[in-house]
Amino acid sequence: MKPGFEDPSAYGSWLIETKLSPPVSNPELIDRSTALQVIDRISTHKVGLIVAPAGYGKTSLLSQWSVLQDEDTRSVAWVSLDASDVDVRQFASYCIAALTKAGVNLGQLELAAESFLVETALASVIPRIVASISNEPRQIILVLDDYHLAESPAVSEFVSTFLAYAPGNLRFLISSRTVPNLAASSLIASSQAFEVGVETLRFSREEMRSFAGDAFDEQTLNYLDSRAEGWAVAVQLAKLTPKEKQQHGVLPPTQREHIANYLIQQILSHCSPDERTFLLRSSILDRFSPKLAERICGSEISRNVLQNSTLVRPLLIRLDSEDQWYRYHHLFFRVAERRP
């Protein structure tokens, strides 16, 4: 890692530092050993595609996998993508920033990325990245998380070209809600790529029991296994739902978002006034820090909830190891946004 990179001022102010690191793994998450072994196939494949609807734990699994890597032999470059990254110059700039943070010496490209590549011919970017990575003794893994948010014709063309000319020590792990427009079928058919889908990501009954302990009765376990199909976000939200509400007869239909909506409503209905205020006000933000939360929720409410709430904290995804930035799961954000 380049010295001084931890300081956000080391890069252009438009780059969001937390997009260049995986969310911090929740220590309460269970060990997904089987799924992690599947992800580790990236050592022998050029591309790993993690494709599943929202709430299946794609980001959490990749985050768990990334912290297990031996930095002496393999370095992970991470980009958390969002809708603003459909601009191919911004997309390429974040890739450069992530690779630099992972220790790849990209020379003048690093400075060019700080300036949004405005004075750099885009056609020259990939050859320069490829040349630099080729000189690395380690395997470099570029993780593109939430790729569906940034996918556009220009971004697809950039990534396809990057894949075509990638050196032997570069790998791509791409998570998305839909199969990326990257000739995935031909990559898989030629054994250059593998796909991780719902069947691998869903929680097994044994994993749900290990995760929840005595929080689930047999009826809830049966429901989550058969009707929610081991959907990770439903399992996590059900653990937060008061046990008396975990009744098979009152749960909603099997559509995944209906289940999430129902479980989130149950959590909201059991929040204290401070917790409810915090959730509904802070959920309008894409990401927030404790200081920002204090401004919109009040300092006393914010400190109390962030430090002590057993209902709110599990709904938050930590974006750094210092607890300075958070975001909500996308499904919770959508449910809260629709409330009057």
Image (tube, rainbow, N blue to C red):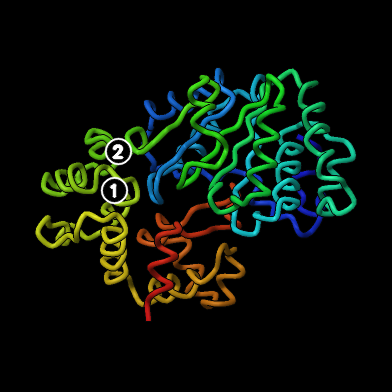
Left or right placement of residue 92 versus residue 62 in this view = right
| Quadrant (top left, top right, bottom left, bottom right) of the C terminus | bottom left
Q: Residue at x 23, y 48 (%)?
A: 228
Residue lying farthest bottom? Answer: 340
Looking at the picture, does residue 25 appear above or below residue 297?
above
Looking at the picture, does residue 14 appear above or below residue 173?
below
Instruction: Compare residues 19 and 51 and report the one nearer the observer.
Output: 51
Q: Position of residue 184 (x, y in %)?
A: 52, 33
> Is tag 1's residue or tag 2's residue first in the polypeptide sequence?
2
Numbered badge on residue 235: 1
Give the amino acid at mark 2.
Phe
Q: Residue at x 56, y 20 (%)?
A: 43
Q: Position of residue 162 (x, y in %)?
A: 70, 34
Left or right placement of residue 84 versus residue 201 in this view = right
Counting labels gives 2
Q: Residue at x 59, y 41 (%)?
A: 144
| Quadrant (top left, top right, bottom left, bottom right) of the N terminus | top right
Visible residue check, residue 5: yes
Looking at the picture, does residue 53 appear above or below residue 101?
below
Left or right placement of residue 242 versus residue 66 in this view = left
Give the amino acid at mark 1.
Val
Secondary structure of the residue carrying tag 1 is: helix
Looking at the picture, does residue 200 appear above or below residue 98?
above
Q: Residue at x 40, y 62 (%)?
A: 332
Q: Quadrant of residue 28?
A: top left
What is the CA distance from the residue labelled 1 to the residue labelled 2? 8 Å
| Callout 1 crowding tier (Cα within 10 Å): few <14, some 14–19, many ≥20 | many
Numbered badge on residue 133: none
Residue bearing the label numbered 2: 203
Q: Position of residue 320 (x, y in %)?
A: 60, 49
For the residues labelled 1 and 2, say whether their Cβ atoms are less than 8 Å apart. yes
Secondary structure of the residue carrying tag 2 is: loop
